[in-house]
Image (spheres, rainbow, N blue to C red):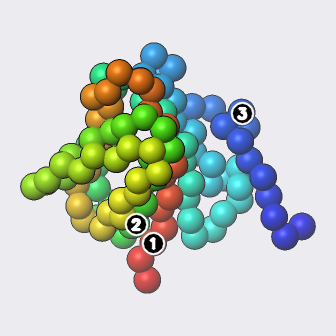
Amino acid sequence: MGYRTASTADVESVVPEEYGGMWFLKDALDTSEVGVTILELEPGAKGKEHDHSGDGQEEVYVCVSGAVDIEFTDDTVTLTGDDAVRIDPGETRQIHNRGDERARLVLVGGPLE
């Protein structure tokens, strides 16, 4: 088969429901070079501060609904519905939902070549 489907219902969230949810779809989609994650953050919730300097993965975050602030080392970027940002592997980032509604994002990552 030349395609595979997956849903958040196919995998367990790695984030407690009280904070939202985070579903890694890479294994369910059987991808080899790209990771796809669905992230939902409740108001007041934040993601883990991290970078990908160790694995060389660049990421793209797409805000599907709500709004989030992404704090970088020297800057903060706000994403709202349909906004996207590309992030270099070595850039430290942390996502915050400072709004009053649940935010939903699609996170895509893959290695730089």
Mark 3–mark 1 CB contact (< 8 Å): no
Between disc 2 and disc 1, whose residue precedes? 2
Q: Secondary structure at mark 3?
A: helix
Residue 3 in sight: yes
Image quarter (top left, top right, bottom left or bottom right) of the N terminus? bottom right
Between disc 2 and disc 3, whose residue precedes? 3
- Determine which of the numbered discs, if any, sits on residue 57 in the image: 2
Q: CA distance from mark 2 to mark 3?
A: 26 Å
Residue 71 is left or right of residue 97, and the answer is left
Residue 54 in sight: no
The answer to whether residue 57 is above or below residue 45 is below
Residue 84 is left or right of residue 53, and the answer is right
Q: Position of residue 34 (x, y in %)?
A: 56, 65
Q: Position of residue 52 (x, y in %)?
A: 33, 60
Residue 34 is left or right of residue 63, and the answer is right
Judging by the rendered image, the residue that carries numbered circle 1 is 111
Judging by the rendered image, the residue that carries numbered circle 3 is 9
Residue 57 vs residue 38, the one in the foreground: 38
- In this rendering, the label closer to the viewer, 2 or 3: 3
Identify the residue at image location x=41%, y=53%. 83
Between disc 3 and disc 1, whose residue precedes? 3
What amino acid type is highlighted by mark number 2? Gln
Residue 41 lies in quadrant: top left
Residue found at the far top of this picture: 18
Mark 2–mark 1 CB contact (< 8 Å): yes
How crowded is the residue under tag 2: few (<14 C-alpha within 10 Å), some, or many (20+)? Answer: many
Image quarter (top left, top right, bottom left or bottom right) of the C terminus? bottom left
What amino acid type is highlighted by mark number 1? Pro
Q: CA distance from mark 2 to mark 1?
A: 4 Å
What amino acid type is highlighted by mark number 3? Ala
- In this rendering, the label closer to the viewer, 3 or 1: 3
Residue 52 vs residue 79, the one in the foreground: 79
